[in-house]
Image: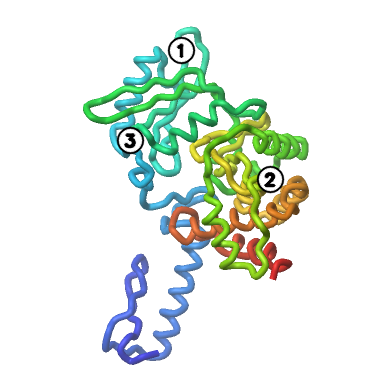
Amino acid sequence: MSRHFLPTIEPFCGPVKFRRHIRLPRPLLRITDRFRHYRLNRIARDGNENPDAAGINAFRPRGSNAAQLGFFERDHSSRFAEACSALNVRQVSDPNTGYGTRSYGAKVIDQSGATAWLKVFGLISESNERWKAETEADTITEVPKPTLLRQISWRHADEFWVARLTTFVAGIVEPGPWADVAADGVEMSWLKSLSTSLEILAQQPCSRIHIQTGIFERWLKRHFRHPPTITSADWVPSHNDLQWSNLSHPDLSLLDWEWYGRSPRGYDQGTLIAYSCHNAELAARLEREFHAVLETDIGIYGKLFAAHTVRNAIRNGWLTPAMTRPVERLIERWEAPLR
């Protein structure tokens, strides 16, 4: 180690930094190294730097991507109240602001006592791509998903707001994206229904492209010596955010269609496996159920692209760093036969 950059002892709650021109005895150097490893392991175990974090899905990103995706991050509760008044419903549950604080959703009830789900969001532009995707997904048939009951839009000052009233879905599998106890308990019949639903989804008419073929082809050339030839038939309608908080059980339903569009076959299946890879038994069950898709020429690479996408989200601070090694091991296992 250079004498110009030697570690110093910091308070327990703070980072171990490198400062200039300070030399510590070797025993103290070993202590600081041990503390650094302890702290990194603590962060990986808890999923974030909150020592009270409990459970694999407790992690939340420090920032929001709402503005980047064209959503307002403010005044959701006030606009939700306006939507309730316009739709003649009232809120009967705590709000759910989602993973990126882009929207405000809650269970509502109308005058007849019927329950529904109301989601409200503000858009910087009326041509917002996430709203377009969700709207096109309303045309999907024969796939278990919430049904749109009514949609309204209005302007508050110079801001454009949308409220979507859909059928209420109970039994969300997990509170976050990663497989935990509830996901581990899903039955084979449920997995078969999910597999069938994804195949029906892949046959829907869909004009939107989610993953650009050029991006995928550049990724293939960067990682593999003999990439497959891509055809238009390899791009199928996909959910593109298939993780455990977007699935319900025991009655299967696929939720949150903001990313709907065409992607390489195997992308949805690979995404769910990546979010389950820390549970070897569950991941194996999923791979067996999705085998017919995952072992096609394009499915082999579609699942890998999905796993790479999840790993990138971890690296960018969007997902818990605790899952870094399980996802990397999955990628290594899937890439090994292709090298």
| Crowd tier of the residue under label 2, counting other residues whose Cα lies within 10 Å: few below 14, some 14–19, many 20 or above | some
Q: Secondary structure at mark 2?
A: helix
For residue 252, side relative to residue 81 (left or right)? right
Residue 237, quarter of picture: top right
**C-alpha span from label 2 to label 1:** 35 Å
Q: Is residue 85 above or below residue 51?
A: above
For image coordinates 63% across by 58% down, the residue present is 304
Asked if residue 169 shows in the view, the reply is no
Instruction: Look at the picture and state if 197 lies above or below 212.
Output: above
Q: CA distance from mark 3 to mark 2?
A: 40 Å
Question: Which residue bears the numbered disc 2?
Answer: 184
Q: Amino acid at mark 1?
A: Asp
Instruction: State which mark lies toward you, 3 or 2.
Output: 3
Q: Amino acid at mark 2?
A: Asp
Q: Residues within 10 Å of mark 3 (few under 14, many from 20)?
A: few
Q: Which residue is mark 3?
A: 125
Q: Which residue is mark 1?
A: 110
**Above/below status of 204 relative to 52:** above
